[in-house]
Amino acid sequence: MNYQVLLLFLNAFLSMLLGAVIILYILRREYLPVIRRLEAERDASAKDES
Amino acid sequence: MTTTIFGLALLFYVAVGVYVARKVRGSEDFYVMSESASTLLIVGTLAATYLSAVTLLGVAGLAYSEGPLVLAATGSFGAWVGTLLAVVYVGRRMKALGCRTLPDFFKRRFESPLVTVTATIIMIVGLLGYGVIQLIGAGLVVGELTNIPFPVIIVLFVLALLVFSALGGMYGVVVTDTLMFFSMLGVAVIVAPWLIGDVGFESIRNIAATDPGYWTLAGTADRPLSFTISQFLVWVIFLSCTPALVSRVFPAKNDFVVLKSAAYGVFLASFLQLPVFIAASGMRVIEPGIEPADRVMIVAFLEHVPPFMGGIGLAALMAAIMSTASTLFVLAGFGLSRDLYENLRRTPVSERHRMFASRVGQLLIGGIVTAVAIAQPSAIYWISIYAGAVFGVGWLPTVVAGLEWRRMNRHAAFASMTAGVGSFVLLSELTRNGVLTLPGLLDPLMVSLVAGIGSLVLVARLTRPSPEEAAYFGHIEASRPSRKTIAEALDGAEPLSALRREYRHIVATVVGLLVLSFVVWGFFAVNLAF
């Protein structure tokens, strides 16, 4: 096996993996708390109505 | 055929440019498309700007002559990571601050005409130096292919570019870039795979039997490991702060578009390049000995693929030249009209005046580019050596510290920019002329980056930020890029479902691209590495 050739394609995959990790981290850190809060508010108002 | 393709492609892009220009209603459209661009448009302009003629000519030629690993294994990896950082870190943060151009950030953060002018001059020299030399190279190649005289090619190119930039501003550049992107995608998914399939992976792999160094990081020229490693760092540093990529983020409709564009952008950066480099290796089997090696893909398009694929290839070459040049020149024009003229005036300008100045800025840049490209003064070659790197050594430390460090101030910004650029030019000249030899892994760019960071820290420690600088840093800390997008969703009818839909869409996009990336690069690795 030629490890140097493998490195070329591994790096192409790694750059995508790095992008995926950063983007998913941003989503979880900045957007997920807002979605969780809105879900909690919706559940609370549904409970109040019932 | 080449002259016809050249003429048709030019006419098509000009017609689109004229059509798009009708949509420009004011300066917000002109500078940032009124922040209305979809994911497709941002991905299109990002990918088209990233893929310049250097990929299809210079780097493909290097892959052909020395082996694809020499530059692509680490230098291109650095460029892909740099592109990612330019979008998700620098571009996203600056968009959240409402910047229309990169020098806007310097003006607001430091409130110093000296810093703004220095940053803008670095930008204009860097963009024009890099852009003009690409235009000259591309003009020579197209001139040779079509037998149209070089000055006529340059005038035609610049006139076409002016239609996008002077009439349509960022609107014209983004839309035409996106159309051009599809021809580049055609090379990656149709032309290059056809060439590779025609030659066969086994033959490409077996080049190493006659040229043992071909499938190594050192290549047939047996370059030192220091070259390979320094190329990675150089390209990360260069691209993460280059205005051509960072400014692609500003027209995006919202933060979701930015995140999706970052995912597609980092995937396409490698996907548009690597098949071309492997196809260039295939050309070494089909037709060894092409001189100069830069012409390898042109020979492939003209002589070794079916005519319609050759047409796609030549159209992609035109697109690569024009998309990169249009972005570089439109930003240089913005630098003249907005960053130097408008932002430094004591009195505000009217909307009509602003539009007039913007278009005059584009026309001035068009005139300068034409004159310099045709006259080809020796200074332009000297400038071009340093043009790409000045953003890394001149801007990167100041931008990162400006975003992250409370103590950062105008004195430190000026010291860092001048020390970074000054030491880079000085060291490069000394090493180029044999007066100085840098040891081992060191590249002048890295030494100058350390000089820029060192002077920034030293001066920032010895001075204090003004109350305005401290207040703006507080504003930066409070300006999360997601804030505006979340606020817009909360103002809508169904905020929870809207946010959840976008969230899931982005997760699915990212995971899908990750799987696709694994399959594509796994396929190439299995066929070439084992």
Image: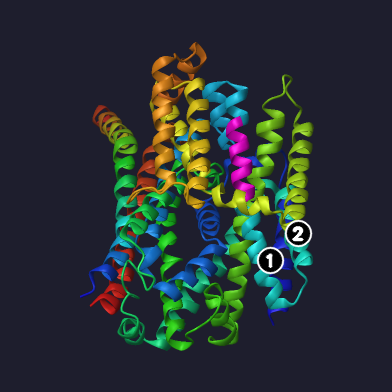
Give the dominant element type of the magenta stretch: helix, strand or loop.
Answer: helix
Residue B502 image label: none
Q: Which residues are magenta?
A: B118-129
Above or below: residue A19 compared with residue B56: above
The chain letter for the residue carrying disc 2 is B
Quadrant (top left, top right, bottom left, bottom right) of the N terminus of chain B: bottom right
Residue bearing mark 2: B374
User: Residue B87, can we see it?
Assistant: no
Horizontal and vertical percent position of residue B305? 53, 85
Specify whether B384 is left or right of A22.
right
Specify whether B380 is left or right of B149.
left
Above or below: residue B119 compared with residue B221: above
SS at badge 1 = helix
Q: What amino acid is at disc 2?
A: Ile
SS at badge 2 = helix
The quadrant holding residue B318 is bottom right
Label whose residue precedes the other's in the sequence (2 or 1)? 1
Residue B139 image label: 1
Whether B126 is among the magenta residues is yes
